[in-house]
Image: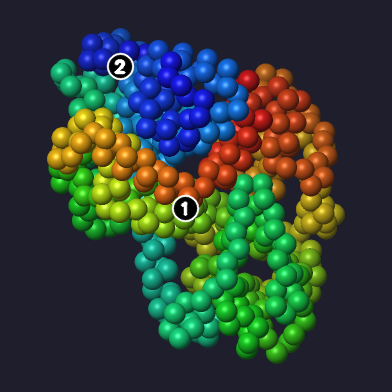
């Protein structure tokens, strides 16, 4: 397990710029990939566009390593680079103005989250099933699911934000998960998991 | 440790330490859960289901997706270091061209669809039922194959990762179908009702024939192969005269520039495909990759260069995808992963 604290970010940020060590760049890539991917999907439903934008950011960092600034907040800097890259990619792709969620990532409209969850699914069939399952939840259930699993808040934070008790948050998420499982089932995943394990 | 023996999938997902274990955020959680799962193997399926939910709801890419993206990054940087690519220029130029092609294809599609709209209206319109689109659909997942009998007695074999839509008006005046991925058609003779396979880019019209259409999103071209009878192909994006095929011919239309390639195939190979017999004769690794992609309609990423050449022999008759991949991986001492409609071949 790599220690992903501020010091190690700064260490690797310095190392790849000054010592041409691409392993440090790769460390940053692994540390940030998930976050960039997840927030990228809030802007487009095409995962391959998001992944190529992420790679473009890191290739660009490598090319411009001598000119890159010292920064205090490395993830923040990479995030801004990614946002800009994705914006250009999307604008070129659709050939028109694109609006990214304004205060990205803090104040997410709920609809962005739902679209992103659906966009992440591999095929149209799954997309339709997942959409239907999410729509079967109450707005409050969906909200808590998003806060817990996407925004990674803990139960206390969610309770505080929604003026309710930790117990209520917990129970709401439990029944939401239960409903999702009834709608969608785990079976197909179990098969996929067996396939993965045996290969 | 808490009493977790009767943990449900929901309980696991609500457990902070389980989340940390799945995301690799804490060594302690990792240790706890790994040993707990070893002691309670019956819970492995629940834990796997919970992990999948966590990734779905958190919109997290799978490990194999990341591995593929990372391999691409490494290759790009290796090329830069070797000086074989002047990176920013190459990068910009290639994305620029891609964007242009997509843009051009989009414009062309819009324009030609309008131009051809009247002509195609007849073929695509019957799916409207009281102003609502009415379809019956079938689809297949990774490694899955499906046989479908249509109302007029025609038969379809739907290959892995494909879908077929049948409008409710099928077999009234005509027999239109829509396909994504790959399917094999054995058409019942009925000269009065044209049998038409539509993809949004191409239409194949047939009269009492046996043929195959391959139109996967991840491949650059659409391919039609004719086993018996006659078919005509209409490119829906250009105003070309229809292409005709004779038995034993295949034809491919490039999705981007609409160029056409033709060739002939070995009828024995298609017979083997119909029978579900997957055969490797002295196959190298790239040949294995090609064949798997062809057979299963899944994008195959080849991320390993074998130390010594591979000569693989094997026959699989109606075996599951997992069995096939397992055997190939074992014999050739490589690792093969399968996830999200992709197969990835890696070093052991």
Q: Label 2's element?
A: loop
Q: Residues within 10 Å of mark 1 (few under 14, many from 20)?
A: some
Q: Label 1's element?
A: helix
Dividing the picture into quadrants, the one containing residue A175 is: top left
Q: Tell me the distance, in whole angstroms, between the alpha carbons under discs 2 and 1.
A: 37 Å
Q: Can residue B294 be seen in this view?
A: no
Q: Name the residue under label 1.
A: A183
User: At 51% from the left edge and 68% from the top edge, which residue is drawn?
Assistant: B200
The quarter of the picture where the C terminus of chain B appears is top right
Q: Is residue B333 left or right of residue A144?
A: right
Name the spot of residue B346 as percent of width and height, x first.
Answer: 60, 27
The quarter of the picture where the N terminus of chain B appears is top left
Which of discs 2 and 1 lies nearer the camera? The answer is 1
Name the spot of residue A109 as percent of width and height, x first.
Answer: 21, 49
Q: Which chain carries label 2?
A: A
Foreground pick, B322 / A179? A179
Badge number at residue A151:
none
Name the spot of residue B325 as percent of width and height, x first.
Answer: 69, 35
Q: In this view, does B176 lie to the left or right of B330?
A: left
Q: Mark 1 lies on which chain?
A: A
Q: Can residue A194 be seen in this view?
A: yes
User: At 42% from the left edge and 19% from the top edge, which residue is drawn?
Assistant: B2
Badge number at residue A4:
2
Tell me the colour scheme of the image: rainbow
**B271 is higher (above) or lower (below) than A75:** below
User: At 42% from the left edge and 62% from the top edge, which residue is drawn?
Assistant: B105
Tag 2 and tag 1, C-beta contact below 8 Å? no
**B319 is higher (above) or lower (below) than B108:** above
């Amino acid at each position: 397990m790599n220690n992903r604290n501020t010091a190690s970010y700064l260490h690797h940020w310095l190392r790849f710029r000054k010592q041409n060590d691409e392993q440090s760049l790769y460390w940053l890539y692994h540390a940030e990939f998930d976050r960039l991917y997840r927030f990228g999907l809030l802007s487009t439903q095409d995962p391959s566009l998001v992944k190529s934008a992420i790679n473009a950011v890191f290739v660009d960092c490598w090319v411009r390593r001598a000119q890159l600034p010292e920064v205090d907040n490395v993830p923040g800097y990479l995030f801004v680079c990614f946002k800009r890259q994705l914006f250009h990619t999307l604008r070129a792709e659709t050939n028109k103005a694109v609006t990214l969620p304004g205060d990205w990532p803090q104040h997410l409209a709920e609809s962005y989250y739902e679209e992103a969850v659906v966009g992440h699914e591999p095929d149209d069939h799954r997309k339709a099933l997942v959409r239907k399952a999410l729509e079967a939840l109450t707005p409050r259930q969906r909200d808590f699911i998003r806060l817990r699993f996407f925004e990674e808040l803990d139960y206390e934070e969610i309770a505080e934000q929604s003026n309710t008790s930790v117990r209520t948050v917990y129970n709401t998420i439990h029944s939401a998960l239960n409903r999702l499982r009834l709608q969608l089932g785990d079976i197909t995943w179990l098969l996929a998991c067996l396939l993965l394990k045996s290969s | 440790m808490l009493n977790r023996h009767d943990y449900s999938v929901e309980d696991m997902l609500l457990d902070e330490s389980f989340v940390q274990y799945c995301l690799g955020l804490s060594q302690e959680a990792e240790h706890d859960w790994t040993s707990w799962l070893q002691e309670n193997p019956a819970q492995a399926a629940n834990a796997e289901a919970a992990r999948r939910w966590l990734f779905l709801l958190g919109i997290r890419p799978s490990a194999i997706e990341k591995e593929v993206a990372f391999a691409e990054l490494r290759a790009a940087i290796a090329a830069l270091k070797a000086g074989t690519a002047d990176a920013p220029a190459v990068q910009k130029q290639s994305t620029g061209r891609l964007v242009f092609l997509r843009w051009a294809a989009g414009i062309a599609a819009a324009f030609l669809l309008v131009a051809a709209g009247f002509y195609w209206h007849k073929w695509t319109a019957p799916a409207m039922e009281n102003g609502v689109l009415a379809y019956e659909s079938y689809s297949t997942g990774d490694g899955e194959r499906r046989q479908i009998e249509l109302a007029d007695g025609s038969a379809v074999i739907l290959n892995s990762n494909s879908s077929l839509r049948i409008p409710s008006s099928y077999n009234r005046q005509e027999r239109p179908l829509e396909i994504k991925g790959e399917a094999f058609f054995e058409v019942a003779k009925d000269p009065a009702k044209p049998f038409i396979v539509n993809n949004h880019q191409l239409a194949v019209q047939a009269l009492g024939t046996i043929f195959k259409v391959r139109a996967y999103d991840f491949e650059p071209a659409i391919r039609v192969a004719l086993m018996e009878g006659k078919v005509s192909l209409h490119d829906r994006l250009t105003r070309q005269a229809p292409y005709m095929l004779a038995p034993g011919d295949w034809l491919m239309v490039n999705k981007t520039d609409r160029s056409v390639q033709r060739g002939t195939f070995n009828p024995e190979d298609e017979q083997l495909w119909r029978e579900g017999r997957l055969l490797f004769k002295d196959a190298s690794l790239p040949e294995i990759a090609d064949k798997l992609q062809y057979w299963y309609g899944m994008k195959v990423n080849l991320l390993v260069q074998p130390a010594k050449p591979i000569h693989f022999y094997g026959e699989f008759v109606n075996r599951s995808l997992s069995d096939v991949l397992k055997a190939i991986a074992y014999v050739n001492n490589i690792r093969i992963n399968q996830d999200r409609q992709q197969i990835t071949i890696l070093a052991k």
